[in-house]
Image (cartoon, helix red, strand yellow):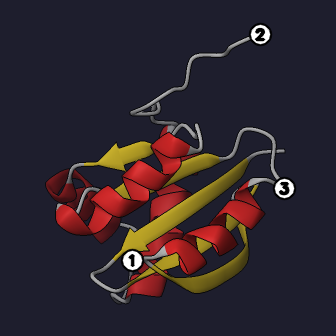
Amino acid sequence: MRVVFGIDVSKVSSEVAILVNGEKVHNYTISNDAIGFARLLGDLKTVHKPEIIFEATGVYSRRLQSFLDEHGYAYTRLNPLEAKKQLDSLRVRKTDQIDAEKLAQSQCVLNRKPTYVQEEVY
């Protein structure tokens, strides 16, 4: 089973879309703080090797990136120009919720390698 978390990061909150085998099963909004990240962590822990993708949005995405690094999750961080180019062909209208879903869908199709991979320790 392939589970992809597409996350559209904004200043105060982030939209999360979860796809299982390419089909959206859930989406929600989290705050970009300990409470929001705890909710995300709860969902991430239910999945073996989740794929996580988000757009690099400067200072806004650094909190998410630090959180994922701290918890040892691999993720794909997209360049904003590359993301825009790829997502423009997939979306009909633009909302943060749709962007999160399209990020996840694009990962299902393009199979990008993670930006960060934690070393396995035995």
Badge 1 crowding class, 10 Å Cα cut-off, few under 14, some 14 to 19, many 20 or more, is few
Secondary element under disc 1, as helix, strand or loop, is: loop
> What's the residue type where badge 1 is placed?
Arg
The quarter holding residue 85 reads: bottom left
Left-right relation of 95 to 122:
left
Front residue of 45/110: it is 45
Left-right relation of 119 to 114:
right
Contact? badges 3 and 2 (CB < 8 Å): no
> What's the residue type where badge 3 is placed?
Thr
Structural distance between the alpha carbons of marks 3 and 1: 29 Å
- Residue placed under numbered mark 2 in the picture: 122
Frontmost of labels 3 and 2 is 2
- Residue placed under numbered mark 3 in the picture: 46
Left-right relation of 116 to 121:
left
**x, y (%) of residue 115?**
39, 33
Front residue of 45/76: it is 45
Contact? badges 3 and 1 (CB < 8 Å): no
Q: Residue at x 57, y 17 (%)?
A: 119
Secondary element under disc 2, as helix, strand or loop, is: loop
Whether residue 109 is visible here, answered yes or no, is no
Front residue of 72/28: it is 72
- Residue placed under numbered mark 1 in the picture: 91
